[in-house]
Image (tube, rainbow, N blue to C red):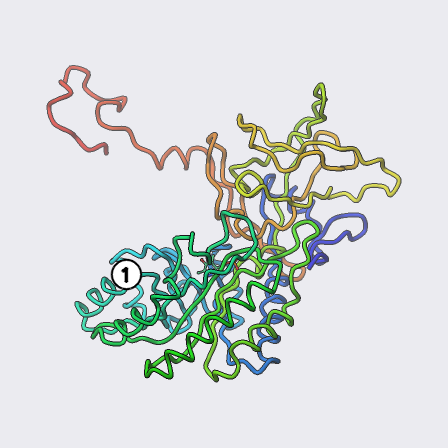
């Protein structure tokens, strides 16, 4: 998927659209996504799964990039959704994804979220504990409904990824312990508000190795076969998401190989299979555009200070993530690269995008693209330092559109209110204890 963004006439571009053109129009920092790249990924995955003879539904993990236009792009292709909150459920619905292609995951669903899922007629809740199962049973019975449930099993497999995004070992908060699965499945089958539908697994994110997948899928398939033989009405499997992308020099699996590993483990069961990719679908399809503010020569290091910051893209700070960084104007082949730290303006040492990175010479005003920023980028952004959220742009073919504008400071300030005693018009003589007055 390198090649989504490529130099065309010396200018880094998405298809025929030069990114500098977008930066000139909307300013920086700004996220740019390629709809064509997202669609290509979706088709590659559904194609690979179909080629393995699987009856598969690809439920895009909305949390990776929840923008309505991104989810809508996938909805038009026929994708389902994997949601982890009521907000994501509403987004999936707004994007046109039917409840019957929506999976509700998450270790801490509230009763209100359970009710919302039931009302939306979702395909299944992936339930992660006995207490959640019993709560969902009660919420469903109160509504005179039955909640379709797949049990998320923790297979105790180390995904060998970053500690903050590994989820399938017995040390993690996720899933039902493999050893308890049988007992909880029997309970689920007996609860009047629960319709036990299957088993699910998700062992982590940014997996670049197929071996943990093979192990987890085989464990799940074996458990599925055992429970089905024992008379439990299991009808489908959910194999989760997590396929990695190449941020630096990782060699993530080819989707065809991933599909083959999944098929080998579960094909003989003859049931429909759900997949929940997030990062793989959108990560490479986005860049964060930023402009060089200053180049500062320190005692030991040279710093390229840019106008994007950790509030826009927190992955380097949070996960020690490596992102490729490319000048928008192709450097001359003979341009001497030198090691620089590429940092944001925020007053935190962690506000950085790269350390000791070989970069051709840059000057203030030059534009850079921070690559592979389409997943867990804008969605994890904050307004720390009262910085304005970066706008988002979607490119499709030769067209591009602003899909989220940069708000202005007045708009952000207007979201806050003062308590009555701080309001400029507050009557200074009124004693504070005279009762609380809502700020208007
Ligand atoms: C986060 C998550 C996903 C998506 O993970 P990616 O690494 O982005 O593919 C899928 N399923 C569940 C349950 C998740 O929590």
Q: Residue at x 19, y 65 (%)?
A: 138
What residue lies at 37% left-to-right and 64% top-to-bottom?
Answer: 104
Spot occupied by residue 209 in the image (x, y as percentages of width and height): 62, 60
Q: Quadrant of residue 130?
A: bottom left
- Residue drawn at the location 70% of the way across and 23% of the way down: 296
Taking the image as shown, residue 357 lies to the left or right of residue 70, namely right
Considering the image in quadrants, where does the N terminus appear?
bottom right
Image vertical order of residue 279 relative to residue 240, above or below = above
| Mark 1 lies on residue | 132
**Label 1 packing within 10 angstroms: few (<14), some (14-19), many (20+):** some
| Residue farthest to the left, as pictured | 434
Please tell me which residue lies in front, 43 or 301. 301
Q: Secondary structure at mark 1?
A: helix
Q: Is residue 358 left or right of residue 151?
A: right
Question: What is the residue that sits farthest to the right in this orientation?
Answer: 334
The image quarter containing residue 176 is: bottom left
Instruction: Please determine whether, in this image, residue 94 is positioned above or below residue 257.
Output: above
Residue 79 lies, in percent from the top left, at 50, 70
Please state the horizontal and vertical placement of residue 393, each as a whole percent of the image: 57, 51
């Amino acid at each position: 998927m390198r090649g989504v963004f490529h130099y065309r006439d010396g200018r880094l571009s998405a298809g025929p659209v030069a990114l500098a053109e977008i930066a000139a129009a909307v300013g920086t920092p700004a996220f740019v996504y390629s709809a064509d790249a997202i669609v290509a990924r979706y088709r590659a995955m559904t194609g690979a799964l179909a080629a393995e003879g699987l009856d598969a539904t690809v439920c895009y993990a909305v949390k990776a990039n929840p923008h309505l236009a991104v989810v809508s792009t996938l909805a038009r292709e026929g994708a389902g959704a994997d949601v982890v909150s009521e907000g994501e459920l509403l987004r999936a619905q707004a994007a046109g994804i039917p409840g019957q292609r929506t999976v509700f995951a998450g270790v801490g669903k509230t009763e209100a979220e359970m009710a919302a899922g039931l009302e939306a007629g979702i395909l299944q809740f992936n339930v992660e504990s006995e207490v959640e199962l019993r709560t969902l049973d009660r919420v469903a019975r109160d509504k005179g409904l039955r909640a379709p449930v797949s049990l998320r099993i923790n297979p105790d497999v180390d995904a060998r990824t970053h500690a903050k995004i590994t989820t399938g070992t017995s040390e993690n908060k996720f899933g039902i312990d493999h050893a308890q699965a049988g007992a909880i499945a029997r309970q689920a089958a007996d609860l009047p508000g629960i319709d036990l539908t299957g088993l699910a697994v998700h062992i982590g994110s940014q997996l670049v190795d197929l071996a943990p997948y093979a192990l987890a899928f085989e464990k799940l398939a074996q458990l599925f076969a055992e429970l089905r033989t024992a008379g439990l009405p299991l009808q489908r499997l959910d194999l989760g998401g997590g396929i990695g992308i190449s941020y630096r020099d990782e060699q993530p699996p080819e989707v065809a190989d991933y599909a083959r590993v999944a098929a080998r483990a579960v094909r003989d069961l003859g049931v429909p299979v759900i997949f929940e990719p997030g990062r793989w679908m959108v990560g490479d399809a986005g860049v964060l555009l930023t402009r060089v503010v200053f180049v500062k020569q320190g005692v030991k290091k040279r710093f390229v200070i840019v106008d994007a910051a950790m509030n826009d893209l927190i992955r380097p700070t949070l996960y020690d993530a490596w992102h490729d960084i490319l000048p928008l104007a192709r450097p001359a082949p003979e341009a001497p690269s030198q090691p620089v730290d590429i940092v944001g303006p925020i007053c935190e040492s962690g506000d950085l995008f790269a350390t000791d990175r070989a970069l051709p010479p840059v000057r203030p005003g030059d534009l850079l693209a921070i690559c592979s920023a389409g997943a867990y980028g804008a969605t994890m952004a904050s307004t720390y330092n009262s910085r304005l959220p970066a706008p988002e742009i979607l490119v499709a073919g030769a067209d591009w559109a602003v899909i989220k504008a940069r708000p202005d400071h007045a708009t952000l300030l207007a979201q806050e209110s003062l308590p009555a005693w701080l309001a400029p018009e507050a009557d200074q003589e009124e004693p504070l204890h005279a009762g609380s007055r809502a700020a208007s």
